[in-house]
Amino acid sequence: MKTLRKSGGFTLIEIMVVIVILGVLGALVVPNVLGRTGEARVKAAQVDLRAIETALDMYRMDNFVYPSSEQGLQALVSKPSGFPEAKNWTEPYLKKAPKDPWGNEYQYISPGSDGPYDLFSLGADGKPGGEGEAADIFAAEL
């Protein structure tokens, strides 16, 4: 007579091997992923700044002038009041007021120090200056 052994699950050794493999993969992958969050936020801010620049250029094409510092980037979301008047503003250039990846407002100054406007993020610390992830990110430098 043949005895058939039923395979009803995994052995303890098989489960331990899988746990060890997952542990090794986790030990290799997690530090690399977590170490790059700062870089990812800087890249996201750079992409945002380019998109805002495009929206500002579209605003200028329609209204023949960039928004003033007082009107700010909110002029890209809702029709601004005050000077300069946005006579040809018909619809939002952006869906919502942009914030940088750290949750701070992007900085907009018009006229700028070396052009029609200055557009930048204050970085992770939300303060002027800084180094690394805390460094200011300027649209003009992209």
Image: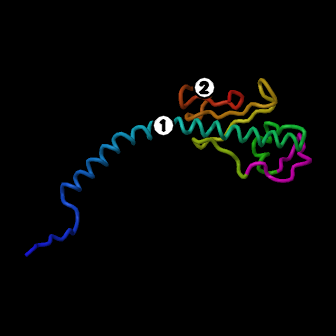
**In x, y percent, where is residue 125?**
55, 34
Which label lies toward us, 1 or 2? 1
> In the structure shown, which secondary structural element does the residue marked by tag 1 occupy?
loop
Overall secondary structure of the magenta stretch? loop
N-term-proximal mark, 1 vs 2: 1
> Quick check: 85 left or right of 72?
right
Tell whether position 120 is magenta: no
| Residue type beneath disc 1 | Arg
**Where 61 sits versus 92, above or below?**
above
Give the residue at x 82% y 37%.
68
Tag 1: Cα neighbours inside 10 Å, few (<14), some, or many (≥20)? Answer: few
The disc at residue 36 is: 1
Residue with the most extreme right position: 87
**In x, y percent, where is residue 115?**
80, 26
**Where 59 sits versus 139, above or below?**
below
| Residue type beneath disc 2 | Gly
45 vs 79, nearest the viewer: 45
